[in-house]
Image (cartoon, grey):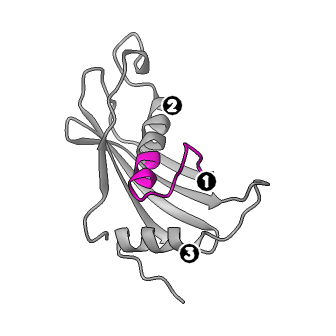
Amino acid sequence: MSPTGPFRIAVPLRWVDVDAEGIVNNAVYASLMEQARYQYFAALLVVAGGKVPFVLAEATTRYLRPGRHGMRTEVTVRTTRLQNSSFRMEYEVLGDGEVLVTSEVVLVWVGPDLRPCPIPDAVRQAIAAREGIVVRA
């Protein structure tokens, strides 16, 4: 567990995010989590100029209860595992303090040719320090 707890950010819902009944569309949760992920890495000073050097390889999402228009939404993010070129992250999307969605994703660090490459040491160290992950030498 992170020494400072999961990264938490408010990610407001927009009117366009809900259907005619005022329920959040399931695809919107992926966008909320992506925005939170971008803010997580921006806070670690890992992304520059809006360029994200990794791609989504796998996602498992559980929808626990419906979100509704007008809810105060937040997303928590934490990195749980660092490997050579990939890493695992977990999310919770909260609406008015209740967990609406949980998700676990695997991301892969890529080079300019979009092929997997090792996570740079400075990035690995920043994530490890934030999350309390022991990095093997």
Residue type beneath disc 1 = Glu
On the image, the x and y values in percent for residue 8 come to 29, 50
Say which of 27 and 87 sits in front: 87
Label 1 and label 2: CA atoms lie apart by: 15 Å
Q: Is residue 88 left or right of residue 7?
A: right
Say which of 124 and 61 sits in front: 124
Q: What residue occupies the far top of the structure in this picture? A: 20
Report the residue at 56% width, 75% height from top: 121
Q: Which residues are magenta?
A: 37-53
Report the residue at 79% width, 54% height from top: 113
Say which of 108 and 124 sits in front: 124
Q: Secondary structure at mark 3?
A: helix
Q: Secondary structure at mark 2?
A: helix
Q: Which mark is residue 27?
A: 2
Report the residue at 51% width, 67% height from top: 123
Residue annotated with mark 1 = 58
Q: Would you call the spot at circle 2 few (<14 residues within 10 Å), some (14-19), or many (20 or more)?
A: few
Residue type beneath disc 2 = Ala
